[in-house]
């Protein structure tokens, strides 16, 4: 992994890019990077994103990510543009808490709980995997609320030579 990472850093730096490193959902990549002689811990300033440290004097981050394990090495200022939109209001009770976010909270009614069960039938399964009684699940759902927080954006890549994605799948 370090050989591929170093090659990506070298290519980007010799092309005039200023890359950063993102380790996404890969504990093994984080451990390999942190045990390298080229890695050093680095405390970030308050208000700045928390970095793992510096690898070859380039910041390395490990933000939350739900996809497949990858390492991204990129000059984020040159890779693309973040386009932020005001999210479309879907429910009447939604409120804008800023230009970027809409928010709503509402209790489950019997009808909305039945709709959720129809859309997500696995919710009927108990912790042991057995199917529970519908009435039991309805009562449980009606003790909860539905929270909706929406942000709408896209990242438009403007220079695909400004970054590399390294798959951590075996």
Image (spheres, grey):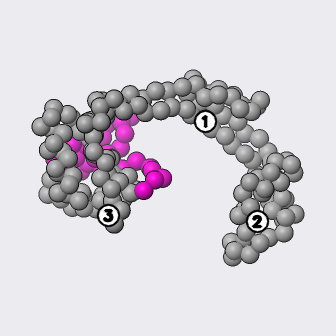
Seen from the viewer's position, the closer of residues 132 and 81 is 81
- Looking at the image, residue 87 sits to the left or right of residue 167; the answer is right
Question: What distance separates the C-alpha of mark 2 from that of mark 3?
Answer: 36 Å
Mark 3 crowd level (few <14, some 14–19, many ≥20, 10 Å Cα): few
> Measuring 83% from the left and 58% from the top, which residue is drawn there?
138
Q: How many marks?
A: 3
**Dot 2 lies on which element?**
helix
Q: CA distance from mark 2 to mark 1?
A: 27 Å
Q: Which disc is residue 150 wearing? A: 1
Q: Earlier in the sequence, mark 2 or mark 1?
A: 2
Residue 106 placement, left or right of 154:
right
Is residue 40 at least partly visible in the picture? no
Q: Dot 2: within a 10 Å radius of its alpha carbon, few (fewer than 14), some, or many (20 or more) residues? A: some
Q: What residue lies at 72% left-to-right and 57% top-to-bottom?
A: 120
Q: Which quadrant is the C terminus positioned in?
A: bottom left
Q: Residue at x 17, y 57 (%)?
A: 3
The foreground one among 14 and 151 is: 14
Q: Nearer the viewer, residue 94 or 12?
A: 12
Q: Is residue 54 magenta?
A: yes
Read off the residue under disc 3: 28
Instruction: Give residue 86's position: percent from left, percent from top.
Output: 58, 25
Give whichever of discs 2 and 3 has the lower sequence position: 3
The magenta segment: 41-68
- Residue at the spot of label 2: 124
Instruction: Choose the circle earlier in sequence order: 3 or 1.
Output: 3
Q: Describe residue 159's horizontal placement relative to residue 105 as left or right.
A: left
Residue 35, quarter of the rendered image: bottom left
Which residue shows up at 80% across the image and 59% down it?
140
Magenta stretch prevailing secondary structure: loop
Local secondary structure at mark 3: helix
């Amino acid at each position: 992994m370090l050989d591929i990472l170093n090659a990506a850093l070298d290519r980007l730096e010799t092309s005039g890019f200023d890359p950063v490193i993102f380790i996404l959902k890969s504990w093994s990549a984080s451990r390999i990077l942190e045990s390298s002689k080229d890695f050093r811990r680095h405390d970030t300033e308050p208000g700045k994103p928390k970095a793992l440290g510096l690898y070859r004097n380039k910041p390395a981050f490990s933000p939350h990510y739900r996809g497949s394990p990858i390492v991204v090495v990129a000059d984020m200022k040159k890779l693309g543009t973040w386009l932020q939109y005001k999210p479309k209001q879907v429910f009447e009770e939604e409120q804008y808490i800023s230009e970027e976010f809409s928010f709503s909270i509402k209790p489950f009614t019997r009808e909305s709980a039945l709709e959720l069960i129809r859309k997500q039938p696995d919710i009927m399964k108990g912790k042991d995997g057995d199917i529970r009684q519908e009435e039991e699940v309805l009562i449980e759902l009606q003790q909860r609320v539905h929270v909706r927080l929406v942000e709408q954006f896209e990242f438009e890549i403007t220079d695909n030579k400004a970054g590399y994605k390294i798959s951590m799948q075996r």
